[in-house]
Image (tube, grey):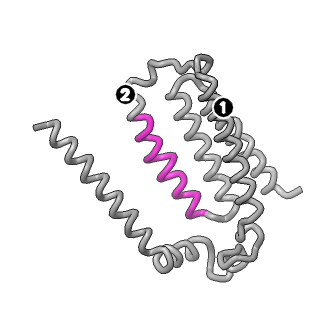
Amino acid sequence: MEISPLFFYLFAGIAIAFSLFVVFSKSPISSAFSLIVVFFCFAAIYALLEAHLIAALQILVYAGAIMVLFIFVIMLLGADKEVLDFKKSSVFLKCSAVLFCGIGVCGFAWVLFHSPILIGTGPHSLEKIKMVGGNTRAISELLFSEYVLPFELTSILLLVGIVGCVVLVKRKSL
């Protein structure tokens, strides 16, 4: 057996275990730190799939910036002192959670079995990505040609969010 599938199953198992800890932990801080471990496992899986750019972005964006923001907000709001009690949840909330999880699993299965990348038939199949020159080049060519408008709209949305934060902070200081 190759070494790569062993590492894949190792990182996938760690990601699943820590994902369960994220969901069932009573402390929001523990959940946030467990989510960081999950993000690092995803980055390792991306590296095994030779998607090094995606792995680096996973660590920089999600494990770095987003989780620092989550932990900052949790500590700022004082949510780390609360203990979440799921036993007192209503029946409607529990049924909704089960229904949502079921829909998520069905959607994931549908995407998994109908994905042109995994089937190898679409314009962005693994063979065509390797012919172009790799994952980084394929992403950059798509991002700056076919998806340039959504890319620019996302940057404008981020700029609006930054300006909104500055306005809120300046308004409170005056």
Marker disc for residue 79:
none
Q: Nearer the viewer, residue 94 or 155?
A: 94
Q: Quadrant of the C terminus?
A: top left
Main secondary structure of the magenta stretch: helix
Provide the residue span drawn in magenta: 52-72
Residue 160: x and y in percent read 29, 56
> Which residue is situated farthest in the left direction here?
174
- Under mark 2, the amino acid is Leu
Residue 55: x and y in percent read 58, 57
Q: Is residue 69 magenta?
A: yes
Residue shown at the point (48%, 53%) measured from the top left: 60
Disc 1/disc 2 C-alpha distance (Å): 29 Å
- Under mark 1, the amino acid is Cys
Q: Nearer the viewer, residue 126 or 110?
A: 110
Which residue position holds label 1?
95
Please say if 98 is above or below 62. Answer: above
Residue shown at the point (64%, 41%) measured from the top left: 100
Q: Is residue 74 magenta?
A: no
The answer to which image quadrant residue 120 occupies is bottom right
Marker disc for residue 77:
2
Give whichever of discs 1 and 2 has the lower sequence position: 2
Q: Residues within 10 Å of mark 1 (few under 14, many from 20)?
A: few
Judge depth for marks 1 and 2 and give the one in front.
1
Q: Nearer the viewer, residue 25 or 38?
A: 25
Q: Residues within 10 Å of mark 2 (few under 14, many from 20)?
A: few
Q: How many marks?
A: 2
Please say if 102 is above or below 146. Answer: above
Residue 14: x and y in percent read 70, 40
> Which residue is situated farthest in the bottom direction here?
131
